[in-house]
Image (spheres, rainbow, N blue to C red):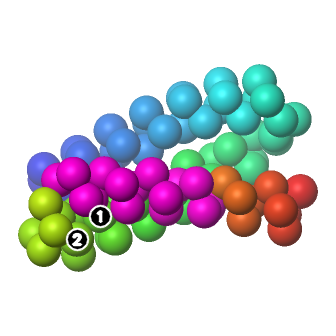
Amino acid sequence: MNTLRLLSLKFVLSLVVYAISLDLFFEASLAQVVSFSVLSTILTYLTGIVILLKRLGSNSTLIVHFFTVYSIIWYFWRYIT
């Protein structure tokens, strides 16, 4: 139950932040913002919390989160829009 709560909180927060920032800097549609939020929530959860947090620690996992989200943003705006 804690994992579901964590994922839903992460999704809602990322949805709000991405909706504000992507709509402010780019002309992103709601479908793009939602799909970006879903993809970033799932990938950062799997790579960061499930795989790397136990092995590398919290500081390294934070750096991996940053580069994961940055890569997703770059991919979305390079190939999808």
- Asked if the residue under mark 2 is in contact with the one under mark 1, i.e. CB atoms within 8 Å, the reply is yes
Q: Is residue 23 magenta?
A: no
Residue for badge 1: 48
Tell me the kind of residue under disc 2: Leu
Above or below 8: residue 67: below
Compared across the picture, whether 43 is left or right of 28 comes to: left
Q: Mark 2, residues whose alpha carbon is within 10 Å: few (<14), some, or many (≥20)?
A: some
Above or below 24: residue 56: below
Residue 77 falls in which quadrant of the image?
Answer: bottom right
Tell me the kind of residue under disc 1: Gly
- Element assignment for label 2: helix
Magenta stretch, main secondary structure class: helix
Q: Residue 17 at x, y = what percent?
A: 55, 30
- Residue 68 in view, yes or no: yes
Q: Which residues are magenta?
A: 58-72
Q: Residue at x 62, y 61 (%)?
A: 72
Residue for badge 2: 52
Alpha carbon of mark 1 to alpha carbon of mark 2: how far?
5 Å
Q: Residue 28 at x, y = what percent?
A: 81, 40
- Residue 64 versus residue 18: which sits nearer the camera? 64
Q: Mark 1, residues whose alpha carbon is within 10 Å: few (<14), some, or many (≥20)?
A: many
